[in-house]
Each structure stands twice: as structure tokens, then as C-alpha cells.
Image: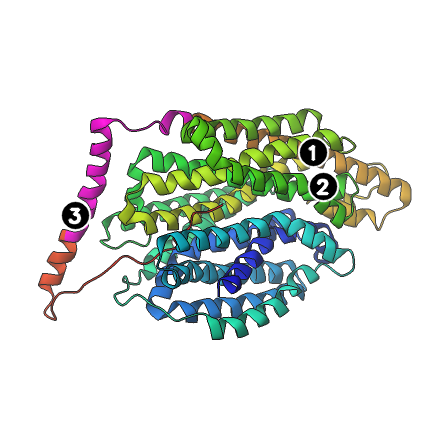
Amino acid sequence: MLAVLCVSLLLSGIDLTVTHAAVPSLTRELRPSGVRLLWIVDVYSLTVAALLVTCGTLGDRIGRKRLVLSGFALFGLASAGAAFAQTSGQLILARALLGAGTAMIMASTAAIIRVVFPDGRERALALGIWTAAHSVGAAIGPLVGGALLQRWWWGSVFLVNVPVVAVILVAGARLIPESRDPVPRPWDLLGVALSVTGLAGVVYALKQAGAQPHPGAGPALAGAVGLALLVWFVRRQRRRPQPLLDVSLFADRRFTAATVCVLGCFGSYTALLFFLTQWFQLVDGASPLRAGLLLLPLAASNAVGAVLAPLAARRWGNRRALTGALALFSGALLFLCAGGGPGHHGVTAVALLASGLGAGVVMTLGADAIMSSADPDRAGEAAAIQETSFELGAGLGVAALGTALAATYRTALPSSVPGVPPAAHAAARESIGAADTAAHHLPAPAADLLRAAARDAYDRGFTVVALVAAAVVALTAALAALLLRPSQGRGRGQGRGRGQGRAKERSRRSARRAAQEPSGPRSGSSSSAPAVLRR
């Protein structure tokens, strides 16, 4: 049974990054705009982040086995739809459905593990193996995609999921036990709508900001509305006795700092994977398989960092180890800007080794800091926020840094290239993939000039992305050093007192409402949200 659940997380991890290797191929076939290309890449992780906590509550109500099998079915159908998509819009929709299926799978399998392994030590081991499967999948995604693209078309990176899902559905129906919460939390449909719509508005504004020199008032209005909806969502969750997302946990500065570290680090790490895959293929001229192999130092050192993280924490303390790992990651990004690039694979490999090592330590210790800063009776709520922070970081990292790269690329591309007609030049401004496609229809001298200009512009854009990511990671390092100091004496007690005060107030509100109902008292319990010691 655990093998079935681990394969599911391996698939979802692979799907997070496998598309990176296919971007040049699908760009030539579907010809998406720069903004649509970013949606293709990160709509998956954004959908997972938006629906993860909601799906945990839904599984408590309708049954976790039913939800996880439904998630697998949706994942398989969406994979087939993505493989045979004829337009970029169809592929974006299919990727969003893949994210919805993954959210259903992840939320349900975590709760199932908690039911099947009642012993604490066995459960911790099972959760560790389960989450490691997701990390391994995300790390090998570009390599798997590159290997498939060596022989088949870009849709094969999605179609390969279908037979695996078919086997999991048959095995899961026989092996996975059914379970549900006897007293599930109330369904907050308005809260779900506010969070999903607000996040979509903010991300849309980010993407449109880099799509053209003067995006106009539309993206700014969408961003403002999105932020307002997210503020409304937070205020609503603070007032509800049983919220979807317990935002009162952020009253603890250590919890907030650790969550921000995870967001910044994993967002930068995922964006680095995506843009490096394009860099190796479109600037350095590597094949998809070779691009995946060139990323192996990053993936391998990330795994080593995750293994060494507990040793580093015991030797230097959680705060110093986390701060040092963030500083290492930031320094590696700066080193990549200074000496890495096409033709400098040795320097690039060193930078990737250091980046992966630092990120691996941060992901492990950041997750541990999130869990340890919450009271034990709120571990499930803390774990749900922890899991969401990883997926949200992945989506926002690609969205924000992709916007910076798109804006720099468009600015750095010359206003005219000898022998390139205006229509081809306008198409080349969308993305480096679009420039490569446009060059296929030009005479050899003009095509070579356009490709060279696009590669130089993308290289500059990647440098800007690495610099911005280095600054973000350095800022989170300073935040960790400042806010992850151990609480002392009265301050710590006051922090817990505030959290306990909010919990008691919610209990009193529930009791008063129950007493007013003619049908008698209504009981409630916390959902078994995904309790995950992530990465």
C-alpha cells in the first residue's frame, strides 16, 4: 500500500518539472506567447497550492480512498488531454486539471498514511519515504523528460503517466483502506473561491507586467482585486471557529520566518530548474537529454543537503545552519552569474552543486522549523501550511522570476535584426523559443543573426533572474538570522498565550452558537490535514 502511495507522489513530483524539458519542442508546435508559456509551466503548482487544504477537508467528508482514486482518475485523464493538446489554451487547462488531481492525491494520501500507521515511529518513517518520493520526482523530472523527447514528441512527457495511473487505480482499489472524519469541518465554499480567485488575480498581474512595455491598467486592477480578495480570505479565516487555513499560526515570528524561507528558497530552486533547462537547450544547444544530465549535480546535491541537514542542525543549531545554507545558495547564484554560462560547464557545475546543497538543507530545516514552532496539537494545521508553502513557492517563483526574464529579454533583443522582417521580429520578442521557431522560416544568414540575438537576450535575462533570486534568498537569510532566535522566557509564553487565547475564543464562539441551535449542540474537530515532514 505504501508503495502505491509513494508512486503517486513520485508522479506528481515528476510532473512538476518534466515540462521544463519539453518547452522548446512544444513552443515550436503550439507557439504560445511568453505569458502563456509561463502559465503552461506553473499553473500546475499554483493549482495544487490553491486546492491542497480544501481537498484535505473534502477527503474528510466524502472518504479519503474515494478522493484519492478520483484524483488518480483525473490525473490520468488530464495527462492524456495534455499529451494531445492542439493549442496552448488546451494545454494550460489540462495542466490545471493535473494540479487539481495532484491536490486530491496529496491531501488524501497523507491522511491515509496517518490512519494506516498508528504507531508514531512507523508513521514518521512512512511519511519520510512518501515525501522523499516527491522530491526525487521533482529532481529527475527534466532527465525523464529529456529521455522521452529523444525518441518521441513533446506529448510523451504527459502520456507516460496514463499506464502508470491505470496500474495505481487497480492496485489502489484493492489495497487502500477507506477512512473519513466522523465529524468533518464545515465546508467553506466562499473561502475556497476567495483564495483561488485572489491568487489567480495576483499571478495574472505578475505575468502581464512583463508581457509588454506598457501593460496598462488591466493587470494593475487585476492585481489589486486579487490582493483585496486574499485579504478578505485572511480576515474570514481569522473569524471562523474552524478555518480552512489557520492564519493565527503566523502570530509566531519563528513560524512566519520559516514559512517565508521555504517560499523564497523553493521558489528560487524551482525557477532555477526551469530556466536552466531552457538555457542549456536554447542557448548552449544541448539536447533535452543532455540538458537533464547537466542538471544532475543540482538534483544530487539537493538530496545530499537534505540528508546532511539534521547533522548540520545538531552541530551548529537550526538557526545557524538554516542561515548558512541560505547564504550558500545565494552565493552560488551570484557565482553562476559571474562565471557560469554556455561553454563554462565546470563553473556552472560547481555553482549547481553549491545551490543544490544549500537548497536541500533549507527545505529540510525550514520544514522542521515550521513544524517545531507550532504546538503539538496543531501539527496538522502547521503541516498543511508547510505543504502549501512549497507548492505556492514553486508557482510564484516561476511567475515572478519569469516576468523578470521576459521583460529583460524583450528589452535586450535589438529593435531590428538585419534580414529579419518585422513580423518575424515581433514573434521573436515573445520568447526565445518563438525566436527559434521564427528563424526556421528565414534564410540562413538572417536566421543565424536572429538566433544569436535571441540567445544573447535570453542570457542577459537569465543573469537578471539569477541576481534577483540571489537577492531574495539573501534577504530570507537575514530574516532567518533575525527572527529564528530562540524565544526567551516571558516572550515565548506570551506568544503561546496569544495563540491559545484565539483557540479558546473560537471554542467559546462555537459553544455559544451550538447553544442557540434548537437541534442541540454541534460538535466539530480539526481535519486531519496533510501532516508532512516535507523534503
Q: Residues within 10 Å of mark 2 (few under 14, many from 20)?
A: many
From the top left corner, tell me how far across and down residue 165 is, in percent. 58, 68
Q: How far apart are the two marked residues, 2 and 3, measured between alpha carbons?
A: 54 Å
Q: Residue at x 85, y 36 (%)?
A: 418
Query: Which amino acid type corresponds to the residue marked 1 in the rendered image?
Result: Ala
Q: Please say if the residues under marks 2 and 3 sit with CB atoms less than 8 Å apart.
A: no
In the image, what residue type sits under mark 3? Lys
- Name the side, left or right, on which 480 lies relative to 308: left
Of badges 2 and 3, the one in the foreground is 2
Q: Label 1's element?
A: helix
Mark 1 is surrounded, within 10 Å at the Cα level, by few (under 14), some (14 to 19) or many (20 or more) other residues, namely some
SS at badge 3: helix
Relative image position of residue 145 (x, y in whole percent):
69, 54
Q: Are marks 2 and 1 in contact (CB under 8 Å)?
A: yes
In the drawing, does residue 28 fall left or right of residue 535?
Answer: right
Residue at the spot 45% in from the left edge and 37% down from the top edge: 365
Magenta segment: does it hold 504? yes
Residue extending farthest right? 444
- Which residue is identified by label 2? 294
Front-lying residue, 435 or 48: 48
Q: Quadrant of residue 293?
A: top right
Number of residue marks: 3
* Callout 2 amino acid: Leu
Q: Is residue 46 left or right of residue 499?
A: right
Q: Which residue, given by chain and number where applicable, does mark 3 sit on?
A: 504
Q: Is residue 386 above or below residue 519?
A: above
Residue 41: image tag? none
Q: Which residues are magenta?
A: 481-507
Spot occupied by residue 469 in the image (x, y as percentages of width and height): 56, 33
